[in-house]
């Protein structure tokens, strides 16, 4: 699902749900092919947010702050996708206690970080915080809410500094031999 919001900048929100890690490889590749074609249609200057259940575990070799001990197959595909489009996962960017990193709990009680908020690296300074919340039981889901605090940093282009030319009093230069000599030396 894609939602476009008018504004300055325009915001494009893409909600996704990836096939499970145990799914057939073709299903996962089809998912990423569709996601790639969707992202390619989003203008580079748009504020892009990709959110959802990517069923991907990113381990410590792939990202700074993670709940997962290792990267799974979906995680490898997500990592390649992030690199291809110059994106990053915000809920792996900020140092948090382990309890604020996991996003999914299986019926057996196993926990993992498989849901992500993804942004363009260009907007990294605009994302101030990101974490998951434990309010998932009240809505009957095995996934937690992942949120981010965003404050758009809009910069205007800097204008070149104006350097006015020095005005030269030609009468002073021609009538005063010292100034005339100094002017000749500086020009040469």
Image (tube, rainbow, N blue to C red):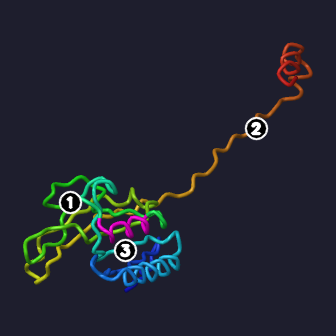
Q: Secondary structure at mark 1?
A: loop
- Picture quarter containing residue 17? bottom left
**Which quadrant does the N terminus fall into?**
bottom left
Judged by depth in the image, the label closer to the viewer, 3 or 2, is 3
Q: Residue furthest bottom?
A: 1
Q: Which mark is residue 50?
A: 3
N-term-proximal mark, 3 vs 2: 3
Image-based side of 41 in relation to 145, left or right = right
N-term-proximal mark, 3 vs 1: 3
Residue 106, image x, y percentages = 12, 75
Badge 3, how many Cα within 10 Å: few under 14, some, many 20+? some
Residue shown at the point (22%, 61%) measured from the top left: 68
Residue 69, image x, y percentages = 22, 58
| Residue underneath mark 1 | 67
Query: Which SS does the magenta portion mostly show?
Result: helix
Residue shown at the point (88%, 19%) measured from the top left: 180
Task: Answer whether residue 73 is magenta in the image.
Answer: yes
Badge 2, how many Cα within 10 Å: few under 14, some, many 20+? few
Q: Secondary structure at mark 3?
A: strand
Task: Answer whether residue 93 is magenta in the image.
Answer: no
Between the residue at mark 3 and the residue at mark 1, the CA separation in whole angstroms equals 20 Å
Residue shown at the point (34%, 57%) measured from the top left: 62
**Which quadrant does the C terminus fall into?**
top right
Total label count?
3
Image-based side of 182 in relation to 60, left or right = right
Q: Which residues are magenta?
A: 72-82
Badge 1, how many Cα within 10 Å: few under 14, some, many 20+? many
Position of 111 relative to 170 (above/below): below
């Amino acid at each position: 699902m894609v939602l476009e919001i008018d504004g300055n900048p325009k915001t494009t929100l893409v909600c996704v749900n990836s096939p499970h890690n145990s799914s057939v490889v073709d299903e996962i590749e089809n998912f990423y092919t569709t996601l790639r074609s969707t992202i390619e249609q989003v203008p580079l200057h748009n504020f892009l947010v990709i959110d959802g259940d990517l069923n991907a575990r990113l381990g410590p070799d792939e990202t700074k702050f993670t709940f997962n001990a290792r990267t799974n197959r979906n995680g490898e595909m997500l990592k390649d996708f992030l690199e291809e489009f110059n994106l990053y996962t915000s809920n792996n960017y900020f140092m948090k206690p382990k309890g604020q990193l996991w996003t999914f709990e299986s019926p057996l009680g196993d926990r993992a970080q498989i849901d992500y908020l993804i942004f363009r690296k260009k907007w990294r300074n605009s994302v101030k915080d990101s974490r998951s919340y434990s309010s998932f039981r009240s809505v009957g889901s095995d996934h937690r809410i992942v949120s981010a605090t965003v404050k758009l940093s809009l910069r205007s282009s800097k204008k070149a500094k104006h350097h006015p030319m020095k005005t030269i009093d030609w009468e002073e230069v021609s009538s005063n031999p010292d100034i005339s000599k100094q002017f000749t030396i500086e020009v040469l």
